[in-house]
Amino acid sequence: MADITTCTDADDLADRAADWLVDAIAATPGRAAICLSGGSTPKRLYQRLARDPWRARLPWPRLHWFFGDERVVPADDPRSNQHMAREALLDQAPVPPDQVHAVPVAGLDPEAAAAAYQAALEHYYGGPALDPQRPLFDVMLLGIGPDGHTASLFPGSPALRETRRWAVAGPPGLEPFVPRVTLTFPALAASRATAFLVSGADKRAILPRVLAGEDLPAARAATVPGVRWFADKAALGEA
Ligand SMILES: O=C(O)[C@H](O)[C@@H](O)[C@H](O)[C@H](O)COP(=O)(O)O
């Protein structure tokens, strides 16, 4: 049975997810890696983390920030996940700049960006092989698209079959139709704690399909033990 926190609305979802994240980090000793989701839903959560009470409760000097996927556009492009996260959180809080590990899209070559991100992940982790006893991330935040994608793992994408690399380039599956870099299932699964944030009536059709375990990327990513769901009533069809 899915562990779903039913939230009144997008603001309540952001409050509850922020509390969950702060508690998850408090339970993690030492350096901690938070992998941010893109899209629009998480923005409210990120804005909350930058302000009290959550700001005061986060151990900023020991936090490292990663991205579950990125649109291969300039870092200052409004479609960039890095751009959204910096505006909402990373440039608004005491985050050491070298602890933000954005997908390197500067050259705008998706394959090169994926390879560079893979190298950055391996450098942070300390090697190229994931140890199930030692997760890569401490917190993984994910969303679901109306087609059942998560990160930039879209239905039918070759990236769904990747078992070795942690980050790959891939085609867009939905707006914005720009090339993507995405974490793969092995990387998404390598997290101590995982939460899906699902808000809005446009998720009303896809959410029950994902929760039912249909063959969809978000459903596969949600098979990790202990996954949490924060969904508002609009997405649950209760509003
Ligand atoms: O780059 C992206 O778009 C995200 O990583 C993507 O996986 C997102 O989580 C879903 O598309 C849901 O997006 P919304 O939260 O905007 O509905």
Image (cartoon, rainbow, N blue to C red):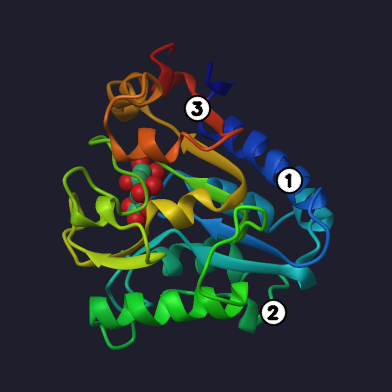
Q: Residues within 10 Å of mark 1 (few under 14, many from 20)?
A: some
Report whether 185 appears left or right of 2.
left
Q: Earlier in the sequence, mark 1 or mark 2?
A: 1
Looking at the picture, tell me which residue is in the foreground, 131 or 182.
131
Give the residue number, with chain letter if any, for mark 3: 231
* Distance between mark 1 and mark 2 Cα atoms: 20 Å
Instruction: Label 3, secondary structure: give it.
Output: strand
Check disc 2 and give the amino acid type: Pro
Asked whether mark 3 and ligand 1 are closer than 8 Å, the reply comes as: no
Asked if 116 appears above or below 184 in the picture, the reply is below
Residue at 60% across / 30% down in the picture? 12
Looking at the picture, tell me which residue is in the foreground, 117 or 40.
117
Check disc 1 and give the amino acid type: Ala
- The residue mark sitting in front, 1 or 2, is 1
Check disc 3 and give the amino acid type: Ala
Instruction: Label 1, secondary structure: give it.
Output: helix
Q: Position of residue 214 (x, y in %)?
A: 29, 25
Q: Position of residue 23 (x, y in %)?
A: 77, 43
Asked whether mark 2 and ligand 1 are closer than 8 Å, the reply comes as: no
* Distance between mark 2 and mark 3 Cα atoms: 31 Å
Residue at 37% across / 37% down in the picture? 220
Asked if 135 appears above or below 3 in the picture, the reply is below
Give the residue number, with chain letter if any, for mark 1: 24
* Distance between mark 3 and mark 1 Cα atoms: 18 Å
- The residue mark sitting in front, 3 or 1, is 1
Work out whether residue 80 can be spotted.
no
Q: Are marks 3 and 1 in contact (CB under 8 Å)?
A: no
Q: Earlier in the sequence, mark 3 or mark 1?
A: 1
Report whether 215 appears left or right of 239.
left
Give the residue number, with chain letter if any, for mark 2: 96
Q: Position of residue 9 (x, y in %)?
A: 52, 26
